[in-house]
Amino acid sequence: MGGDFPVLGWPNPVSPIVLAMDDRETARLRLRRWRADDLEPYARINADPQVMRFIAGGVPKTREECAADLAYVEAHWERHGFGLWAAELKETGELIGFVGLSEPTFIPDLIGAVEVGWRLGREHWNRGLATEGARASLDAAFGELELAEVVSIIDPGNLASVRVAEKLGMEYGGPVRHPLGFRVGVYRIRPTPQLR
């Protein structure tokens, strides 16, 4: 699936992808599909107001909302063959959040794009884990999936995520309006020889 295939102004043919990305490991992370026993730790992560501060208006999520999130993530995997992985520490097996690729359907201007995203529990911030997992996601995006571009949607106040995007080599592409009324920044990256 290489090349530029414009879909609503984006160069990625999201819907036709049927390849299934495999689970993978990085130096410190195991990136895998979700399991039923992930709901409780995932709900704890999303109940933390600091974790949710820059996400969807800054409101912590309930357990029921987290269950709906995971059902949506699983449906995305089934529909597209890629998605957000559960991220666990290899050393302990602890679920620490997610990292991976998804279609950002919540922002109409970005339908057809593929986003690299991450969300980790607060106790795992500032250790390079988001960058490590996101780099593995980009390797999959530009390797197996042969995407022409990947974006990341970041609240401008979330300086830690902006730093992750910059470490990945992403460049600021401008603002878009979130459906809740605020502006978010879109960061972009295209494959380079070292990312293919």
Image (cartoon, rainbow, N blue to C red):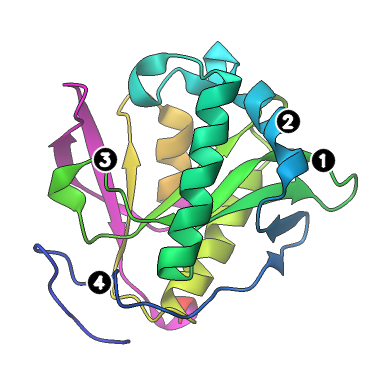
First-in-chain label (4 vs 1): 4
Query: Is label 2 in contact with label 1 (beta carbons under 8 Å)?
Result: yes
Callout 1: SS? loop
Residue drawn 46% across the image and 76% down it: 195
Residue identifier under label 1: 94
- Residue 120's tag is none
What whole-number distance in Å separates the C-alpha atoms at marks 4 and 2? 33 Å
Residue identifier under label 4: 12
Asked whether 65 or 13 is in front, the reply is 65
Residue type beneath disc 3: Phe
Query: Is label 3 in contact with label 1 (beta carbons under 8 Å)?
Result: no
Residue identifier under label 2: 41
Residue 60 shown in magenta? no
Asked whether 148 or 163 is in front, the reply is 148
Quarter where residue 13 is shown: bottom left
First-in-chain label (2 vs 3): 2
Asked whether 146 or 15 is in front, the reply is 15
Whether residue 189 sits left or right of residue 159 in the image: it is: left
Q: Position of residue 81 (x, y in %)?
A: 48, 71
Q: Quadrant of the N terminus?
A: bottom left
Residue type beneath disc 4: Asn
Residue type beneath disc 2: Pro
Residue drawn 41% across the image and 65% down it: 79
Q: Position of residue 103 (x, y in %)?
A: 33, 55
Residue 186 shown in magenta? yes
What whole-number distance in Å separates the C-alpha atoms at marks 4 and 3? 17 Å
Asked whether 80 or 86 is in front, the reply is 80
Residue type beneath disc 1: Glu
Callout 3: SS? loop
Query: Is label 4 in contact with label 2 (beta carbons under 8 Å)?
Result: no
